[in-house]
Amino acid sequence: VGGSIAARSTGRETAAELLASRARLPEPFRTPLPVPRVARPVSSTGGVDRYEIVQRVADREILPGMRTQVWGYDGQFPGPTIVGRSGREARVTVDNELPVPTSTHLHGGVTPPDSDGYPTDIVTPKGWRHQHADAGTGHGGIHMPTDAWRTSVRAKEYVYPLDQHAATLWYHDHRMDFSAPQVWRGLAGFFLVRDDTEQALPLPERERDIPLMICDRAFEEDGSFRYPSLDPSLKGEPGVEEPYMEGVMGDVTLVNGAPWPELEVDAARYRFRMLNASNARRYRLRLEPGGPLIQIASDVGLLARPEELGTVTLAPAERAEVVIDFSRWRPGTAVTLVNTLAGGGMGNVMRFRVTRKARDASRVPDRLADVESLSRARVAATRQFDFRLTAPSGSGSGHAWTINGHPFSTNRYLATPRLGTVERWRFTSDFHHPVHLHLAHFQVEARNGRPPAAHEHGWKDTVDVRPYETVDVLARFAGYRGRYMFHCHNLEHEDMAMMANFRVT
Ligand code: C2O
Ligand code: CU
């Protein structure tokens, strides 16, 4: 089974792998690109910025003229952008008014364990009891030891010390077994970290510094999000779809929550913080009709120097910050951001329309940041992790997504790195698995023994491990001791237990 999946996944996606919308889909490039609003702290005293966010159900217009019910941070999709400062603590109180429990993870954050959004560290809605009350909306709670719920509170204050460099982070739901359907319904937002080094650079700023959350969705006829039921107890019932081995992919591309939007730009440089927030889809982004994407940052920080690229590949959860100089095109030109990994409508992402000549004091300097190379660090240990679809022993049903043969369990540890050390983690796989480490930032050392591609330089927290590849990363375990996790960020694989704990000792 693994072999045939891998073979299919290396080419373009086929229509059969998409979840087809039942709603009438809009013409591309008609909707203006929305930019998520920046959250205001409720207080900024004692060196701490405090935010309050309420997770709630809201109706939004995503497809023109239709209503989509979203589960959003402050009812928004994407959620409000939080802008933090390196070295300054942010505290975010998340209040849950949704009908389901949640857990919020700051992806890329160097965060103490009790604020890291561990999947069982949940915030429950009022009156919630731990029953299968939401069977049919997610993956069925099958991996859950009953004693594992650490907390059960209605609101939680997450503490983010932000002892880390400027970077484009994001926050999203991480609830045990249900991250995929809950993120699909809207639980994701940007969290930017700024610092003095980055702000001293002459890069494009303010209205020319724009985050782009790229993800795919499918819609029902009435405009609601369409997501297959993966409840095993419903298997075989009419109208109930099987889990998609590849993860769930839709047939509408959203950028900042709008379908195939258009952005009017000056003939000037712009900085785009691109995030692939899709559950399962990968993107190989390029400009049509050509032109460079100047990458300045990867997942968790600036590159040492800019990389001028024709394409940038993003697996789920990866980020790339790029500068595009629109002054190379005449006003009136339409420049399309396309995904060369998909055909048909899904080959489009969004469009830029160059409107007018404009003053531009920005530039991209040759040196961006001091990036210490971990290749010279002492490697304290080398560990290997195999991400694989495993046939269960005995007569169990179906296959399981596993790491070193284990589906997730809250009390199994696959590694115990020591605080302050650098380790080499070697990932192998049978399929596309975007592997994400909480807490530890890493550098890609080698892909099949060769140096990584340019877009994978710098500090990262997610690396795409492709079928039958061996990827080595050098990870620094710094910040905090305690329990953290690593997992496949294909959210359906994650929910189907392709996760593991490590403990920093
Ligand atoms: Cu973005 Cu553990 O996840
Ligand atoms: Cu996976």
Image (spheres, rainbow, N blue to C red):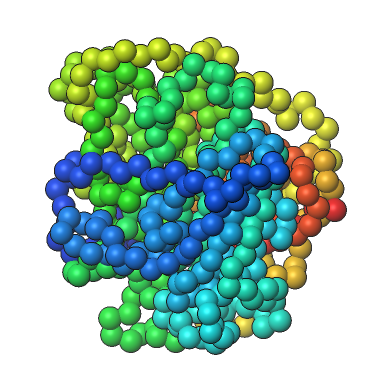
Relative side of 424 to 53, left or right: right
Q: Quadrant of residue 494?
A: bottom right
Q: Residue at x 24, y 45 (%)?
A: 260
Q: Quadrant of residue 323?
A: top left
Relative side of 356 to 323, left or right: left
Residue 307 x %, y % = 49, 21
Relative side of 141 to 254, left or right: right
Q: Is residue 15 visible?
A: no
**Looking at the image, which is closer to me, 292 or 57?**
57
**Looking at the image, which is closer to me, 124 or 326?**
124
**Looking at the image, which is closer to me, 133 or 42?**
42
Residue 154 x %, y % = 58, 73
Q: Residue at x 61, y 36 (%)?
A: 85
Q: Is residue 70 visible?
A: yes
Residue 442 x %, y % = 67, 39
Residue 239 position (above or below residue 445): below
Q: Residue at x 20, y 45 (%)?
A: 31
Q: Residue at x 54, y 57 (%)?
A: 52
Residue 330 x %, y % = 19, 16
Residue 454 position (above or below residue 40): above
- Image label count: 0
Q: Quadrant of residue 113?
A: bottom right
